[in-house]
Structures are given as C-alpha cells and as structure tokens.
Image (tube, rainbow, N blue to C red):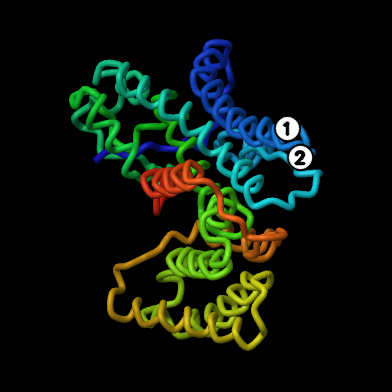
Amino acid sequence: MSKSVLATGEHFLTLDDFWKATAFSIPFIGILLIHELGHFFTSLYHKVRCSLPFFIPVWLGFMGIPSIGTFGAVIKMKGFVNSRKKFFDIGVAGPLAGFVVALGVLIYGFSTLPPADYIYEIHPEYADESFQGYGEDAIDFELGNNLLFSGLGEVFADPERLPEMAEVIHYPFLFAGYLALFFTSLNLLPIGQLDGGHVIFGLFPKSHQYVSLIAFTGFIGYAGLGFISPYLPGDDLLIRIPLYLAFLYICYSKSGLTVQNKLTIVLSLAAVQYAIAFVKPEWEGYQGWLFFGFLLGRIMGLKHPEVSGLREISTSRKIIGWIAILIFLISFSPKPFMFS
C-alpha cells in the first residue's frame, strides 16, 4: 500500500499552485464558516448576543511541517442563555449545517474522481517498477477512515478511481470533506459544553454530568492506551507513570469531582490501561487525542451551565438530537491522522 509523503524540502508557491489550492481551501473554509453561521443565526433567532465567527489560524511552515491553515472557527457567546431549548438549538445548528454541506462536497468529490493515473501526476515515481520507497527523511502520512467516508466511497465512487486513504490529501474535495467530518465529530463529542454536550443536555438534562464524565473517561482512556506498558524499559516507566498520572489528574481538574474521586478515577484508569497493555500489547490508542483531552478537561471543563427548570424539549428536537448523535457515530475517526 502506498503512503503519502510529506516532503521536507523547500517549495516555492506558484500561481498555478495557488489556484489548485483553492479547490481545497474554498470548500474547507466554506464548510467551517457554514458551521459557525449555523450557531450565529440561531443565536440571533433566540436573541442571544454573540460574536461574529472568527477562524483560528495556524502556520507550521517555519517548522517545515505542512498544515491546513486553521484549527477551526469559533463564535463567542456574549449573552446569558438560561434555556435548555436555546442551548440545544444553538448547539445542534452548527454541526447540522456544516454536515449537510460537507456531505454535498464529499458526494461531488467521489462522483467526479479523476482517472486512476491521476496519482502519477502527483507521484510519477509510483509508475517506476524499481521504486522502493522514500528515504528516512520522509514522513509517511495516512488518513484514518470512518463509516460515512468509506460508505460514500462505496456508493458514489468508481472503484477503479477510488484513492487509498494515504492519497486522499491529493484529492481536494475529498480532503476538505474528510476534514469537515473530523471537525464535526469533534464538536459532537458528548462532553461538557461542546455542541454534542449541548445536545446531550437537551436530551438528558439530569444525566448530562454522568454522560459527559463517562464519555470523557472513555475518550481519554482510549487516547492513552499503550502509553504505559509493562513491556517498556523500567527506566522509561519510572518517568512515564508519574508524569502520566499527573497529566490525567490535571485533565479532570474541571470535572466538578472531589479530590478523592479524581484520584480514584485516575488511578483506576491508568491501572486498566496498564492491564490491557499487558494482555494485548498490540492494542494502541491514538495519543494525538491526549492534547484535545487536556483542552476539554482543563480548559473547557466537563460540566454544563445550569438553567432554570428542566422542561422537556419537543419531539422534533429529540429526533434532531438523535440524528446528531448518529452523525457523530458515522463521522468519527478513531485515528484520524497517522504519521510514521
């Protein structure tokens, strides 16, 4: 199986490169913008003050690392929300709006794939039978799959033109749609004040704290699987175990739990991960999620703002809430970006 390779050498951007890049950047940025506008206009509808959408820029070129240019977009709620229905509507509107556009972009991308030999325009070396791979300076990169992306490929793509996940980054509409699903699924995690947290609060207001805590523990537990293992050298474990336990404790700092309960969860979680590594050393989580887990647990917190009263939302909103949960399940990639 081929692997996309991130070159470490310099490359000067040409006008042709710029126009080719717009095939990715316009749909990608457009989907993120539609997502945030879903929040924005729903906030206006409910007369909740909020900021205009703004993007979080990122540039890693100075480190020699290609990047997509942004960590996503956000809006800031300026008004007080004291309604379960408003929280639900504002939270679910963004992911649904962005998802609909992402779905259209992906269907178009899979339906209009270039001929199979298109990849040789990007990697002419693949056509050389003597090609044995790149040198040690290259970084192998591959996207992880998810149920929706693979399903759309099965339905709408010509099997002979369907790229491997290692090559999707060379297909701008597919890559833009994949990243849109990635950001949508992140926002729909049923944790804290993420969009998915608002959905869970709307559906199960009395159980939100427990659902959020369980989901976060499962998320961080999967992320760190394999980080501490009995098969690591003893010197490494002497450093890793205390640092990892401290990291986990910090991740639960805004959980609303007592010190005793936090310690119990942290020690139990680390013990379970260590035991799994002993029985199944080949099982590894995705340690790239650990940073996001830190942001959730330490910065954002796992609790949801209180509202006065727990009046049930309408049946139509409950259906929309379950649709949002389904979107999360089919869009989430356990290992979205794999480097080696």
Apparent side of residue 108 relative to residue 151 in the rendered image (left or right)? right
Instruction: Give the percent coordinates (x, y) of residue 45.
Output: 70, 32
The disc at residue 44 is 1
Count all numbered tags in the image, as a single digit. 2
Q: Quadrant of residue 74?
A: top right
Q: Quadrant of residue 163?
A: top left
Instruction: Give the percent coordinates (x, y) of residue 236.
Output: 49, 79
Circle 1: element type: helix
Asked if residue 139 shows in the view, the reply is no
Residue closer to the observer: 17 or 200: 200
Q: Residues within 10 Å of mark 1 (few under 14, many from 20)?
A: few
The disc at residue 48 is 2
Apparent side of residue 332 relative to residue 58 in the rendered image (left or right)? left
Verify CB contact (< 8 Å) between mark 2 and mark 1.
Answer: yes
The correct choice, above or below, for 182 with respect to 213 in the image is above
Q: In the picture, which quadrant includes the N terminus?
A: top left
Residue at 62% from the left image edge and 77% from the top image edge? 249
Asked if residue 26 shows in the view, the reply is yes
> Of the residues shown, which amino acid type is indicated by label 2?
Val
Instruction: Give the percent coordinates (x, y) of residue 211.
Output: 51, 66
Residue positioned most to the bottom: 260
Residue at 67% from the left image edge and 65% from the top image edge? 298
Q: Residues within 10 Å of mark 2 (few under 14, many from 20)?
A: some
Residue at 49% from the left image edge and 69% from the top image edge? 214
Disc 2 to disc 1, C-alpha distance = 6 Å
The disc at residue 217 is none
> Of the residues shown, which amino acid type is indicated by label 1?
Leu
Instruction: Give the percent coordinates (x, y) of residue 200.
Output: 53, 56
